[in-house]
Amino acid sequence: MRDWLNIIGSVNRPVLGEEIPILIFRAFRIYSGEYLKDLMGEKGAVVLFQNAGRELGKELGERLKDDDLNRYIDNVQTFVKDSKIGLLAVEEIDQKRAVLKLDECITCAGMPNIGARICHFETGFVAGVFEAFLGNKVKAVETKCNAMGEGTCEVTVDL
Ligand SMILES: [Zn+2]
């Protein structure tokens, strides 16, 4: 994939600056997602968003890499907080699986219960972060979401 992070990281908005209202981020995200669902079906759209998130997670994971898993996760937590994606916390982790919570999730925090888990990009992102560390593919599922009325966003990764 092209070096998109460097390409899109170059911003020239002397008047408007680098921040946008979160509503606008969510609108771009949700409208794209809904359109994709029309085009590719629910499953296809989920896979697409999850794989896109996975690519980003892998790329950022490479940049934040540390040989020590705890230090690596620390780096990721700091990045996720500083870039206001959310507050990432490890709920449990062992050889087999990791459960991570994303409080104040950029996509779903505060959303009413619409009966669906919608943070497929974030789910892929977490998977990609682990893939960068482990060097192999992992499976991740969103196991809680504010949009499902579950009070937080949570991702479970099979390691
Ligand atoms: Zn969510």
Image: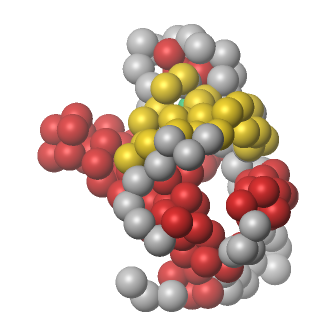
Q: Is residue 89 above or below residue 59?
A: above
Q: Nearer the viewer, residue 83 or 38?
A: 83
Q: Nearer the viewer, residue 23 or 99?
A: 99
Image point 66% across, 16% down: which residue? Answer: 151
Image point 29% across, 48% down: which residue? Answer: 47
Residue 106 x %, y %: 66, 42
Q: Is residue 8 visible?
A: no
Q: Is residue 123 left or right of residue 104?
A: left
Residue 20 x %, y %: 72, 55
Quarter of the figure that contains the N terminus? bottom left
Residue 109 x %, y %: 67, 28
Residue 31 x %, y %: 40, 42
Image point 70% across, 31% down: which residue? Answer: 91
Q: Answer with the quadrant where ligand 1 appears in the image.
A: top right
Q: Is residue 108 above or below residue 129?
A: above
Image point 81% across, 80% down: which residue? Answer: 14
Q: Nearer the viewer, residue 100 or 151?
A: 100
Q: Is residue 85 visible?
A: yes
Which image quarter: residue 107? top right
In the rendered image, the residue lying farthest to the front is 95
Q: Nearer the viewer, residue 41 or 98?
A: 98
